Image (tube, rainbow, N blue to C red):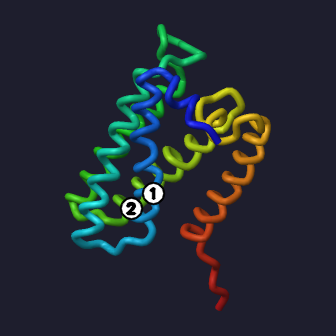
Amino acid sequence: MTLDPIFTADIAVQLHIAFALPAVGLGPVVLFWSRPGIWHKRLGYAWVIAMAGLALSGFFIPSAMGWLGWFGPLHLFSGLTLWSLWHGIALARAGNYRGHRATLEGLWFGGNGVAGLLTFIPGRTMNRAVLGPFADYGWWVIVLGAALLFAIWAKRNLTPVKLA
């Protein structure tokens, strides 16, 4: 593991990573372990700020598959993230805690989980920083991480059917 790919990356990528680390770390605490209360709210707002910074900084990273200038398909996720954050907070303020939970859990699984795993595609900054000369193992990280994410999601969302 070496931090050189991060330190030599464009400033937008460095900011993106700086927001991603607390977003990925705080997400499970707020969404899965924290009971609703003052700490859930405080840590939740910290997570929202990290996610908003992550999404906003993503707009400044040029896409290799630019559709409109440097904007590409991944930039749609930045917009979806900002909308999901706004919607999730609006649901909580309206008292719709089930919708709040579903929206923000979905954002964590998709925005932090799936998108985070895709940073391990060989050639990307996080792949080079974490895996170094073993860049091709990034595909295994993605497959195993996706299996783990699915298992966590399934345990939380799929309830067994009770037979009479």
Q: Where is residue 115 drawn, in percent x and y?
A: 56, 40
Reply above or below: 112 against 7: below
Q: Is residue 118 visible?
A: no
Residue visible at 54% across and 18% down?
A: 63
Residue 143 in view, yes or no? yes
Measuring from the top left, give residue 103's x and y in whole percent.
Answer: 40, 53
Q: Is residue 91 left or right of residue 133?
A: left
Q: Are marks 2 and 1 in contact (CB under 8 Å)?
A: yes
Frontmost residue, 93 versus 127:
127
Left or right: 86 as drawn, with respect to 80: left
Residue position marked by numbered label 2 in the rendering: 101
Q: Which mark is residue 79?
A: none
Q: Amino acid at mark 1?
A: Glu
Residue matched to label 1: 105
Callout 2 environment at 10 Å: few (<14), some (14 to 19), or many (20+)? some
Quadrant showing the C terminus? bottom right
Q: Amino acid under label 2? A: Arg
How many angstroms separate mark 2 from mark 1 (CA)?
A: 6 Å
Residue ranking furthest to the bottom? 164
Q: Position of residue 146 (x, y in %)?
A: 67, 52
- In terms of depth relative to the viewer, which is nearer, 120 or 162? 120
Whether 9 is drawn above or below 101: the answer is: above
Vertically, is 34 above or below 66? below
Which residue shows up at 47% across the image and 21% down it? Answer: 10
- Residue at screen point 45% across, 57% down: 105
